[in-house]
Image (tube, rainbow, N blue to C red):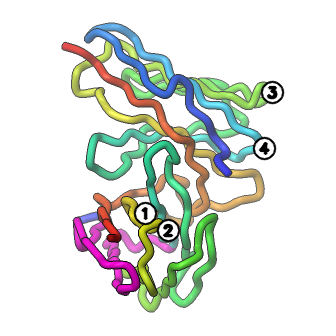
C-alpha cells in the first residue's frame, strides 16, 4: 500500500492564481482531512470529510474549497492564492474504527 | 485556538539520555495521541492513550495522562540520534470523532551523538 500520497511536493504561485492540491489514499479510510502547518503554529485543520459526498469546515477554511467524489481522493482547491496561504499542507486519513491518522508527505506552497 | 500546548518548545540531550516532553490541554478529551515529525516529512503516529487510562507503554515510549490536571507526558528512554524530530500531542475531544484532532505546536527534540 502506498498509504496517503500528495502531489505536488512543492509549488510556487503568484497572488490571485488558483490551484488544486491532490491527496489520495489506498487504505479505504472513510475519513480524510487537510491541515496546514505554519512555523510556531502547529497543525490547523482546514477541511475534513467523513465519506464520499460529505465535507465540512475545520478551524481555518477561508480561501479553500474541498470535494470528495470518491473514497480515495480528497483534493484541496485554492481559489485565489494569497501570500497568507504560504504554508505546508498535509492530508491525513483515518478509519471509523481507529483514532490514528495517517499523514501524507506534505505539499510545500509558496505564494508570491 | 490550539487545544494542546507542548513543553518545552525545544529540548537538546545526549544519546542514551531520557527525553521527557509535556502536553497540556484545555477541554475534556476522549483520547490523546503523540505524533513524530522528522524534518520535511509528514507526521507519524506513535501512541494513543484514552481518557480512562493513566499510563501506556510502547517500546521505549511511555505516555502518562492526568485528566485532573489536563496534562500528558511522553518519555523516550535511552534516546538515539534517530529520535531527533518534532513531537506533537493531539487531542480528540469528548463527543468528537476520529477525524477531528487538535494539535499542539510541538517540541523539537535534538539527540546529539
Where residue B37 appears, as percent x and y from the top left, is 35, 42
The chain letter for the residue carrying disc 3 is B
Q: Does B103 sit above or below residue B99?
A: above
Residue at mark 3 shares a chain with residue at mark 4: yes
> Which residue is labeled 4 in the image?
B28
Q: Residue at x 34, y 77 (%)?
A: A21
Q: Chain of mark 2?
A: A
Residue drawn where x is 34% and y is 74% of the image: A23
Question: Which residue is labeled 3 in the image?
Answer: B68
Q: Quadrant for residue A86, please give it.
A: bottom left
Task: Specify start and end residues of the magenta stretch as a single range.
Answer: A4-30
Residue drawn at (72%, 45%) of the image: B29
- Are the residues under badges 1 and 3 in a single subunit? no
**Marks 2 and 1, how far apart at CA:** 5 Å
Q: Is residue B98 visible?
A: yes
Q: Which residue does the numbered mark 1 point to in the structure image?
A: A92
Q: Quadrant of residue B61?
A: top left
- Which type of secondary structure does the marked residue at label 3 adopt? loop
Between the C-alphas of marks 2 and 3, the distance is 30 Å
Q: Dot 1: few (<14), some (14–19), or many (≥20) neighbours within 10 Å?
A: many
Residue A108 on image: x %, y %: 30, 62
Q: Which residue is mark 2?
A: A33
**Disc 2, SS:** strand
Crowding at dot 4, Cα within 10 Å, few <14 / some 14-19 / many 20+, comes out as: some
Instruction: State the CA–CA distance, disc 1 to disc 3.
Output: 30 Å
Amino acid at each position: 500500500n502506498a498509504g496517503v500520497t500528495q502531489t505536488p511536493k512543492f509549488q510556487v504561485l503568484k497572488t490571485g492564481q488558483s490551484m488544486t492540491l491532490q491527496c489520495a489514499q489506498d487504505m479505504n479510510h472513510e475519513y480524510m482531512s487537510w491541515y496546514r502547518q505554519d512555523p510556531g503554529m502547529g497543525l490547523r485543520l482546514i477541511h475534513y470529510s467523513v465519506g464520499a459526498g460529505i465535507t465540512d469546515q475545520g478551524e481555518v477554511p477561508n480561501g479553500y474549497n474541498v470535494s470528495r467524489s470518491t473514497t480515495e481522493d480528497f483534493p484541496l482547491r485554492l481559489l485565489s492564492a494569497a501570500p497568507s496561504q504560504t504554508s505546508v499542507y498535509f492530508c491525513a486519513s483515518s478509519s471509523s474504527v481507529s483514532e490514528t491518522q495517517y499523514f501524507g508527505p506534505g505539499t510545500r506552497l509558496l505564494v508570491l | 485556538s490550539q487545544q494542546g500546548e507542548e513543553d518545552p518548545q525545544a529540548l537538546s540531550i545526549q544519546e542514551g539520555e531520557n527525553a521527557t516532553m509535556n502536553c497540556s490541554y484545555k477541554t475534556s478529551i476522549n483520547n490523546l495521541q503523540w505524533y513524530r515529525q522528522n524534518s520535511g516529512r509528514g507526521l507519524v503516529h506513535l501512541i494513543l492513550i484514552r481518557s480512562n487510562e493513566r499510563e501506556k507503554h510502547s517500546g521505549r515510549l511511555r505516555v502518562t495522562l492526568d485528566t485532573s490536571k489536563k496534562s500528558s507526558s511522553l518519555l523516550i528512554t535511552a534516546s538515539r540520534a534517530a529520535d531527533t524530530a518534532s513531537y506533537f500531542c493531539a487531542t480528540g475531544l469528548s463527543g468528537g470523532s476520529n477525524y477531528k484532532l487538535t494539535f499542539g505546536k510541538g517540541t523539537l527534540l535534538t539527540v546529539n551523538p
